[in-house]
Image: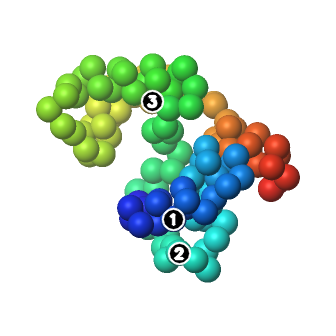
Amino acid sequence: MFSTDALTRAWREGRLPTYREHVTTYIRFHPNMFRIHNVRHDPDLSSLRWTVDEPRDLEFIRKVYDRLGDDGFGMDDVLRVLREEPALGQINVGLERDAGLKASMRKDCLA
């Protein structure tokens, strides 16, 4: 979660292509300039991939959306759908996490 002020500052000050494409990276790489806290959730859901970086990610998101509709839904609703249909959670399994970020960082000599 990021404040509008933090995102605006990162957008304004982050000039490297990596920071332009992955604006939150600027915030993480400059912890002295931002208040940063880690939020833990029980159970740990960090293995779940809820992003749209690859075609399989988009397929996953579309299928979840098809089941939940456009009336608004939250994390608990998505988790319920995944419990009811575990195969949905396998659609984008195995994709490398942060592959685009890592490639950008190599180009900018940040890796």
What's the distance in space between the residues labelled 3 and 1, CA to CA?
Answer: 35 Å
Q: What residue sits right under mark 3 in the picture? A: 89
Residue found at x 21% / y 39%: 73
Q: Which mark is residue 99?
A: none
Q: Nearer the viewer, residue 93 or 38?
A: 38
Q: Is residue 78 left or right of residue 73?
A: right
Q: What residue sits right under mark 2 in the picture? A: 34
Q: Nearer the viewer, residue 71 or 48?
A: 71
Q: Earlier in the sequence, mark 3 or mark 2?
A: 2
* Residue 51 x %, y %: 49, 37
Q: Is residue 54 left or right of residue 101?
A: left
Q: Quadrant of the N terminus?
A: bottom left
| CB under 8 Å between discs 2 and 1 | yes
| In the image, farthest residue toward the right | 109
Q: Is residue 41 visible?
A: no
Q: Earlier in the sequence, mark 2 or mark 1?
A: 1
| Image: 31 above or below 91 | below
Residue found at x 51% / y 51%: 46
Instruction: Write down the quadrant of residue 5 in the picture.
Output: bottom left
Label 2 Cα neighbours within 10 Å, binned few <14 / some 14-19 / many ≥20: some
Q: So how many labels did they put on this image?
A: 3
* Residue 107 x %, y %: 82, 43
Instruction: Write down the quadrant of residue 110 in the picture.
Output: bottom right
